[in-house]
Structure formats: C-alpha cells, structure tokens
Image (spheres, grey):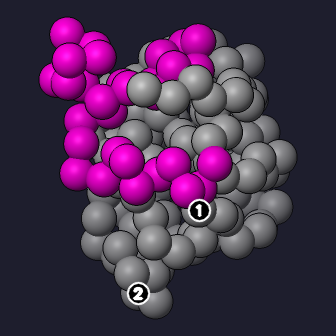
C-alpha cells in the first residue's frame, strides 16, 4: 500500500499493472483508437494501455500528448489510472479537459519510480484519494 500525491483528481481505477520500462510519447507512440502502444521502438510495443493501471517512468514530450489522452478517454481506451514518476503538465492537461467535457476521467497520481516494481504483475487499485493498493492482498480484502 502506498499513498501517492494526486496530480489530477478522477475516478478510482483498478486493473493489471502495466509498468513501462521506458518513457513514451503519446503522440505517435499510442494508438488512440485501440489504446495499443504503437511505437515499434518502445519495449512494450503492442501492449494495450486500455483498462490498465499505467506506470509511466517518464514521457517524451509533445504538445499533442494531451489530445491523444483525450481521444483515449473519449473512446473508452484510457488507462484505469495513471501513475507517474514526474508530472507531465501537457499530458495531464488531457485529463483535465476530458473531465471538463464531462467524460469519465481516470485519476493520475505521482509515486516515486523506485516504488513501481512492487506492483509488477499485480492487480492494482488506485483510489480517488491517491491510495495505491495491490488487490487480493491482506491489505485490501
């Protein structure tokens, strides 16, 4: 169990942890129509981020990242929650605008990168209050 800082309030989310091993660019790196990682140079190419608790070790900047995240939210292919090592204001703007549009928006939190590995291969829940827990453990039953 970890208490994370809330970056963008949103709905609590639960899903399998997807811990990216490298930073990603949402613009050109994630297909907004499917939620799949499309960048052939990315180690997790082909993985879907839809419905996952997405742990981001970093992002590769693009002013269009917010638009891609908005498209993912609108199409129902967004992550269940986002866990970032460092805030990315442009990416997070996509969640803020999505919420303003009235769409169901996942919560985004900040957690130290060295804490990510504890969630590898686990079913993870990120509460609206920023609590990150492993589902099915004694801590959350």
Vertical side of 85 occupied by 9: above or below:
above
In the displayed orientation, state which residue is furthest to the front.
138
Badge 2 density bin: few <14, some 14–19, many ≥20, Cα 10 Å: few
Of the numbered discs in the image, which one, if any, rests on residue 27?
Answer: none
Of the numbered discs in the image, which one, if any, rests on residue 40?
Answer: 2
The answer to whether residue 120 shows anywhere in this view is yes
Q: Residue at x 24, y 42 (%)?
A: 122
Vertical side of 95 occupied by 86: above or below:
below
Q: Residue at x 41, y 87 (%)?
A: 40
Residue 131 left/right relative to 136: right
Vertical side of 135 occupied by 116: above or below:
below
Viewer-proximal residue, 9 or 3?
A: 3
**Quadrant location, the N terminus:** top left
2 or 1: mark nearer the eye = 1
Q: Sequence-wise, which precedes: disc 2 or disc 1?
A: 2
Q: Residue at x 58, y 12 (%)?
A: 129
Residue 63 in which image quadrant: bottom right
Q: Is residue 113 magenta?
A: yes
Q: Residue at x 39, y 81 (%)?
A: 43
Write down the region rendered in magenta. 112-141
Residue 28 in which image quadrant: bottom right
Q: What residue is disc 1 on?
A: 57
Residue 93 left/right relative to 113: right
Q: Pinpoint residue 52: horizontal percent, then vertical percent.
A: 34, 42
């Amino acid at each position: 169990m970890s208490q994370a800082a809330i970056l963008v309030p949103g709905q609590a989310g639960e899903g399998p942890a997807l811990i990216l091993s490298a930073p990603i660019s949402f613009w050109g790196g994630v297909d907004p129509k499917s939620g799949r990682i499309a960048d052939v140079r990315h180690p997790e190419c082909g993985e879907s981020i839809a419905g996952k608790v997405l742990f981001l070790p970093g992002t590769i900047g693009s002013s269009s990242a917010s638009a891609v995240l908005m498209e993912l939210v609108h199409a129902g292919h967004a992550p269940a929650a986002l866990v970032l090592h460092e805030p990315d204001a442009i990416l997070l703007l996509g969640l803020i605008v999505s919420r303003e549009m009235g769409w169901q928006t996942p919560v985004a939190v900040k957690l130290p990168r060295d804490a990510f590995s504890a969630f590898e291969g686990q079913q993870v829940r990120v509460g609206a209050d920023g609590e990150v827990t492993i589902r099915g453990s004694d801590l959350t039953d």
